[in-house]
Image: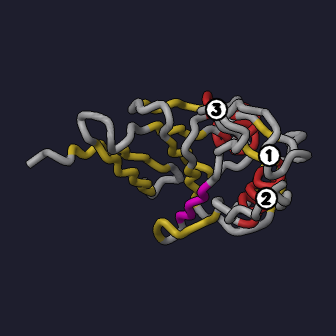
């Protein structure tokens, strides 16, 4: 009879990285190891995301909608594999069976609390589309930029540019690049 062994700890697959001066990338791991194609976020990762957002935000709104000040004022771009519409597998993660799982709606609600979140870039659906996540308070809105895979035809990559318009507003440019283009 084989001896039962504990499941080895998995590496942490969510992290932050500098994209440019004043622009921080936040990578999320939306894979749910319980299976299926749809993902989710564990409570630990969601709580860590909230603390990273607070640390890099000059102001934000708490869960009750009250304005909070603190942190720095970086622009934030979030990255994940799954989209807001495909983060919904709430089955327990076998590596963390007692940890709650969270949906795309919960993630959107969290990101909307931080006005310096300008975009959420993701894939999974293999479609090139941009989804506005508006809010009654305009500064709490952000763009979801869904892009196809490099294995799809035609083969595209996407460049995301964040431009300061020097008037208190930003512009996002999301250029598709064809790898076979001259």
Q: In the displayed structure, does residue 132 sit left or right of residue 148?
A: right
Residue 13 vertical placement versus 105 (above, below): below
Among all residues in the image, which is located at the extreme left? 182
Crowdedness near tag 3: few (<14), some (14–19) or many (≥20) residues, C-alpha within 10 Å:
few
- Magenta part of the chain: 23-27
Mark in the foreground, 2 or 1: 2
Sequence-first tag of 1 and 3: 3
Residue for badge 3 = 36
Asked whether residue 139 is in view, the answer is yes
Q: Is mark 3 on a helix, strand or loop?
A: loop
Q: In which quarter of the image is the N terminus?
A: bottom right
Q: Are marks 1 and 3 in contact (CB under 8 Å)?
A: no
Residue 2 vertical placement versus 93 (above, below): below
Residue for badge 1 = 94
Judge by depth and name the residue closer to the eye, 90 or 69.
90
Q: Residue at left 67%, top 41%?
A: 140
Q: Are marks 2 and 1 in contact (CB under 8 Å)?
A: yes
Q: What element carries label 2?
A: loop
State the separation of the CA atoms marked 2 and 1: 9 Å
Q: Residue at left 70%, top 30%?
A: 88
State the separation of the CA atoms marked 2 and 3: 20 Å
Question: Horizontal and vertical percent for residue 110?
Answer: 75, 43
| Magenta residues, dominant SS class | strand
Question: Horizontal and vertical percent for residue 127?
Answer: 41, 30
Residue for badge 2 = 7
Q: What element carries label 1?
A: loop
């Amino acid at each position: 009879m084989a001896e039962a062994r504990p499941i080895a700890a998995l590496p942490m697959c969510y992290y932050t990285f500098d994209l440019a001066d004043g622009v921080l990338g936040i990578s999320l791991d939306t894979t749910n190891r319980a299976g299926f194609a749809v993902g989710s976020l564990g409570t630990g990762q969601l709580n860590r995301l909230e603390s990273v957002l607070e640390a890099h935000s000059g102001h934000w709104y708490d869960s009750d909608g009250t304005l909070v000040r603190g942190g720095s004022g970086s622009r934030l771009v979030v990255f994940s594999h799954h989209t807001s519409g495909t983060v919904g597998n709430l089955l327990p993660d076998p590596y963390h069976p007692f940890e709650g799982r969270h949906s795309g709606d919960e993630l959107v609600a969290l990101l909307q609390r931080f006005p310096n979140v300008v975009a959420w870039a993701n894939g999974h659906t293999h479609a090139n589309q941009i989804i506005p996540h508006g809010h009654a308070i305009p500064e709490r809105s952000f763009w979801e930029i869904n892009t196809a895979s490099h294995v799809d035809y035609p083969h595209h990559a996407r460049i995301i540019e964040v431009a300061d318009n020097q008037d208190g507003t930003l512009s996002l440019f999301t250029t598709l690049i064809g790898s076979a283009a001259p």
